[in-house]
Image: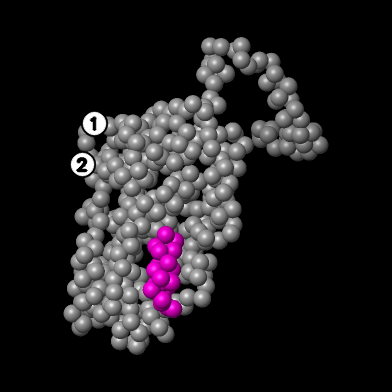
Amino acid sequence: MKKILLAYSGGLDTSCILTWLKEKYDAPIIAYCADVGQEEDFEAVKAKALKTGAEKCIIDDLKKEFVQDYIFPSIQANAVYETVYLMGTSLARPCIAKGMVEAALKEGCDYIAHGATGKGNDQVRFELTMKALAPHLKVIAPWREWEFTGRSDLFDYAEKHGIPLPITKEKPYSMDANLMHISYEGGILENTWNEATEDMYLWTTAPEKAPAEAEFVTVDFEEGCPVAINGQTLGPVALMNEINTLAAAHGVGRIDIVENRFVGIKCRGVYETPGTTVLMQAHKAIESIVLDREVAHLKESLAIKIAELTYNGFWFAPEAELLRGFVVESQKFVTGTAKIKLYKGTSMVVARKSPQSLYSEKQTSFENMSAFNPADAGGFININGLRLSTWSQKHASTEKSLQPTA
């Protein structure tokens, strides 16, 4: 073993892991911290890593890459896991893991260590990314091999070794924060009947305390990617910050779900995803007027698969890259503006427009029938109803089943 690169955050798990690695292995350790928008004091994180035993601490700014190469493609795909989860953690992990691989190769490391638990999804996401990008690198996953059985053991270990921690035994939530969301797991949330307490939420305003007046926000898209908020063109990171601020102020983006992990366990999680909630709605609004019906329906069916692949850690799998290529092709004409109403925890599309719109007011209007011949509808119905009539005539029992009983 030449050198170990550890995915490091300075939290409970990775702080203990760094000390544990120093005790167990005779190899220099490089702490790697990816900045994906979690707004931490990275100088303090770096100082803590070096004090705890790291030979070096890398702070890697991945914010632009995270937004541009992961969040925006997911919005283009309308990828939502199990109809609700926008996958803030699922998207961040391949971005971070890619950064880890690049750093490990540059620093001459032959091992990568991470703090993902043996029951969680993140171990899968980290390691599948490594296998796709640098299969020769070996992995150390302490939660799968050390003597500790739970986080209470880590608190004792940290106390014994004088390791300062950002959480307490009273509030041992497992949190993940980035430009897209904040997630909360563990603690009181492990009982699905316990409601999340208001003091848990760190980002969004409680809907009850949100402004009494609605706020309207416009989002401009070019080829499926958001480029401007309220008419102001912004870069990827600045745009995410702006829409997050606007949506969070109105309490938008809170969800409380039980999701199915890839490893087969159900997990309860609470999430705050303010800005992306609005961007996803706005994107769907533009697509509704510019995509051909069959393309839209095909894309909708594939979005479920894309979300599943992302959630399960297959971001760099060939089938995932193939599907993202289809999405990019589908977005060539997804350019336009959507208007969203923000009010007390809700966001709703109220208007949309596009120079590429397929929507025809003339065709749709009840006041003008010149663009559509109603008489054609009869033949259309007859042709589509032919197989239904044939089935009914052949199976007379169908008619009998509709007869009222005495």
- Residue 91 in view: yes
Q: Residue at x 42, y 85 (%)?
A: 1
Q: Quadrant of the C terminus?
A: top right
The answer to the question of whether label 2 and label 1 lie on touching residues, with beta carbons closer than 8 A, is no
- Residue 177 in view: no
The residue indicated by pointer 2 is 209
Q: Residue at x 48, y 66 (%)?
A: 129
Classify 10 Å Cα crowding around label 1: few (below 14), some (14-19), many (20 and above): few
What segment is highlighted magenta in the picture?
Answer: 94-121
Against 272, is 260 above or below? below
| Residue 342 falls in image quadrant | top left
Q: Position of residue 51 (x, y in %)?
A: 21, 77
Amino acid type at circle 1 is Glu
Q: Position of residue 198 (x, y in %)?
A: 23, 52
| Front position in the image: 284 or 387 | 284
Against 110, is 77 above or below? above
Against 23, is 11 above or below? above
Q: Is residue 229 left or right of residue 352?
A: left
Q: Position of residue 189 (x, y in %)?
A: 32, 61
Q: Secondary structure at mark 1?
A: loop
* Residue 91 within the magenta-colored segment of the rendering: no
The residue indicated by pointer 1 is 213
Against 56, is 261 above or below? above
Q: Residue at x 56, y 40 (%)?
A: 330
Q: Is residue 330 left or right of residue 113?
A: right
